[in-house]
Each structure stands twice: as structure tokens, then as C-alpha cells.
Image: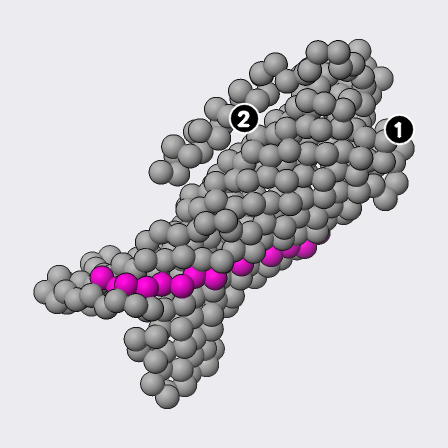
């Protein structure tokens, strides 16, 4: 399913970039994708597919949880200039995204006796609330603006730094389980568990954009999260078991977007995004099961979220 969605997004982006976007009677100038104030407000809808999860183990992984990242989200993004010059500009920008629908099947696998040999397995109906946000300071400049070639004249390079977070709050219900190497099967209707992923960290990155045609802009942006911090908060309702997890790691994000001006300050755009958040260092867990408390156990090899998707939206530039 991920590959089909991602392929559809790539096709949509290429069609948008190469389609007849400019309306009759519109003039194409050097700053055709910029408004007089430089304030850019964007709204989009995007579909994602992927998995989030965590592992439990010490000598080997004895338990692995997987949560679906399949859904539709809305996103609002805004940027505004702090200062603008002919060759460069300094901007502040931010975005927020939330789930319109986000559900699927969660999976719980145990490997209690031998590595990689599953002893127990269960599935549950899963849904999640999603919150994604970030704020950046962005430096943009055009080093070749005096060149005659379209690519070089319109090429802009940018670097940014900021802070952001991604939160995925899952609720599971209707357990379907197979234990003891398939010998014991049972189902439990109703609520089963909750688990919340929180990923935060400092962001740094770079962006390159150019206009192959006067009214069309294509941009590629890469983000690195060098000090990714992951936290998990779980409650297993059928076992009277609560726990909190933490781990450190790294994240990377790749965005590719094509944007086309269709009327005055109005543009439409389409793009694809790939996200990898992997916290696989210094993993610990603190919890309480049936009144027995423990703290700081180094039993969390990793907490992860990996997903990709495509978006379509519109932009108004003031």
C-alpha cells in the first residue's frame, strides 16, 4: 500500500509540474511566485503510509509492537520575512499537521523462548490522534540571479534551523490473539491498550528550488534531526500494566514539491515526503505491573516511526 500511494504522489507531482498551469492573460515576471509582503500561507491534505513501533529485549528482542501510520492529514504552513534583500532573505516559518483519519491494525509479536521464533502474536483495531509541528529560521539566497540561464537565474538556496515534534497517540481495541505457538487462540472485544509516541528534536537542513518555467517552482528540501528524543507512554488495560519509555537517536526527512501559480498570488502544489525517525540509543523503561514497580531498565532497543506520503494543496502569497 505504501508503494502505491507514493507512486501516485510522484505521478501527481510530475503532472502538476508539467501541466498547463498559467492562466491566459497572466504575465510571468522574475518574482512571479512572490508577493509584495513575502508572507506565504499554505493549506494542504496529505496521505501517509508506514509503521511506528518499539521493541523490548535485552539479550534478544522478546517483544515487538507495530502501529499503522496509514491515514489522511491536514497541514497548515506559514512563512514570513524578517528581512528581504535583492540577493537574500531571512524568514521565520512554522507548520502544524493533524489527522483527519488515521487507523489500521496494530501487531504485537513475542519471541519468548528463542530469537526470531514467534511464540505469541496478536492484532487489534487501532486508531490515532496525530500532532506534527515545527518552527524554523530560514535563510534564503540567490547566488546566480544575474545569469542568463533560466535554471541558474531562478535558483535559490536555503538553510534552516529550528525545533519540532511529532506525536502519535494510539488507542487499540478488539484483540485477536494466538499464543503458545498457535495452540491457544482467543479474542477480547472492547478497549485493549493505549500507547503514545512523542518525537522531538532540533532540526537543521537545506533547500534548493528553481523555476523551469516562469510560473512553476520545483523544490527539494532535506531535514536532519541529529538529537532526536523519543518517549513512549503505554497502558495495557488487560494486564494492569503501565510504563514509560525513552530513547535517543536521529531523524531524516525528505520533501520534494512542485508549485504552480494559477492566479495572482494563488498557487497550487503537490509533493512527496519521506520520514524516518529512529531512536535506538540509551533506551530505558520505567513501569508498574500489578503493583510491582521498576525503574530505568535498559530493555528498549528502539522506538521508531517510518512513513511516506504525498500531499496536494494551495498557497496564498501576500
Inter-mark Cα distance, 2 to 1 = 30 Å
Point out the frontmost of discs 2 and 1.
Answer: 2
Mark linked to residue 13 = 2
Label 2: which secondary element: helix
> Which residue corresponds to mark 1?
86
Residue farthest toward the bottom in the current orientation of the protein: 291
Region in magenta = 160-176
Does 167 sit above or below residue 86?
A: below
Q: Residue at x 70, y 48 (%)?
A: 94
Q: Which class describes the residues within 10 Å of circle 2: few (<14), some (14-19), or many (20+)? A: many
Q: Residue at x 48, y 24 (%)?
A: 11
Give the camera-side residue of 123 and 53. Answer: 123
Residue 136 placed where, x, y %? 72, 48
Instruction: Please state which of residues 189 and 183 is positioned toward the viewer in this rendering.
Output: 189
**How many residues crowd around disc 1 within 10 Å: few (fewer than 14), some, or many (20 or more)?**
few
The majority secondary structure of the magenta stretch comes to strand
Between discs 2 and 1, the one toward the N terminus? 2
Q: Position of residue 291 (x, y in %)?
A: 37, 88
Amino acid at each position: 500500500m505504501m508503494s502505491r500511494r507514493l507512486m501516485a504522489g510522484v505521478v501527481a507531482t510530475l503532472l502538476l509540474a508539467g501541466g498547463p498551469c498559467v492562466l491566459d492573460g497572466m504575465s510571468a515576471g522574475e518574482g512571479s511566485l512572490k508577493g509584495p509582503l513575502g508572507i506565504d500561507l499554505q493549506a494542504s491534505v496529505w496521505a501517509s503510509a508506514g509503521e511506528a513501533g518499539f521493541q523490548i529485549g535485552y539479550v534478544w528482542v522478546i517483544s515487538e509492537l507495530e502501529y499503522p501510520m496509514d491515514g489522511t492529514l491536514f497541514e497548515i504552513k506559514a512563512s514570513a520575512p524578517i528581512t528581504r534583500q535583492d540577493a537574500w532573505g531571512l524568514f521565520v516559518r512554522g507548520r502544524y499537521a493533524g489527522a483527519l483519519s488515521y487507523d489500521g491494525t496494530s501487531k504485537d509479536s513475542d519471541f519468548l523462548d528463542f530469537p526470531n521464533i514467534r511464540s505469541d502474536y496478536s492484532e487489534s483495531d487501532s486508531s490515532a490522534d496525530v500532532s506534527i509541528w515545527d518552527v524554523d529560521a530560514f535563510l534564503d539566497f540567490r547566488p546566480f540571479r544575474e545569469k542568463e540561464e533560466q535554471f541558474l537565474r531562478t535558483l535559490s538556496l536555503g538553510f534552516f534551523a529550528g525545533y519540532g515534534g511529532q506525536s502519535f497517540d494510539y488507542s487499540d481495541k478488539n484483540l485477536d490473539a494466538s499464543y503458545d505457538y498457535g495452540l491457544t487462540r482467543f479474542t477480547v472485544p472492547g478497549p485493549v491498550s493505549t500507547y503514545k509516541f512523542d518525537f522531538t528534536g532540533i532540526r537543521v537542513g537545506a533547500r534548493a528550488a528553481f523555476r523551469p518555467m516562469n510560473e512553476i517552482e520545483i523544490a527539494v528540501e532535506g531535514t536532519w534531526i541529529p538529537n532526536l528524543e523519543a518517549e513512549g507512554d503505554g497502558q495495557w488495560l488487560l494486564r494492569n500494566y503501565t510504563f514509560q519509555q525513552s530513547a535517543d537517536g536521529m531523524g531524516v526527512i525528505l520533501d520534494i514539491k512542485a508549485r504552480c501559480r494559477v492566479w495572482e498570488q494563488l498557487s497550487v502544489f503537490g509533493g512527496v515526503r519521506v520520514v524516518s525517525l529512529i531512536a535506538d540509543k540509551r533506551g530505558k523503561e520505567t513501569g508498574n505491573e500489578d503493583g510491582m514497580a521498576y525503574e530505568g531498565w535498559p530493555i528498549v532497543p528502539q522506538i521508531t516511526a517510518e512513513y511516506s506520503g504525498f500531499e496536494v494543496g494551495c498557497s496564498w502569497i501576500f
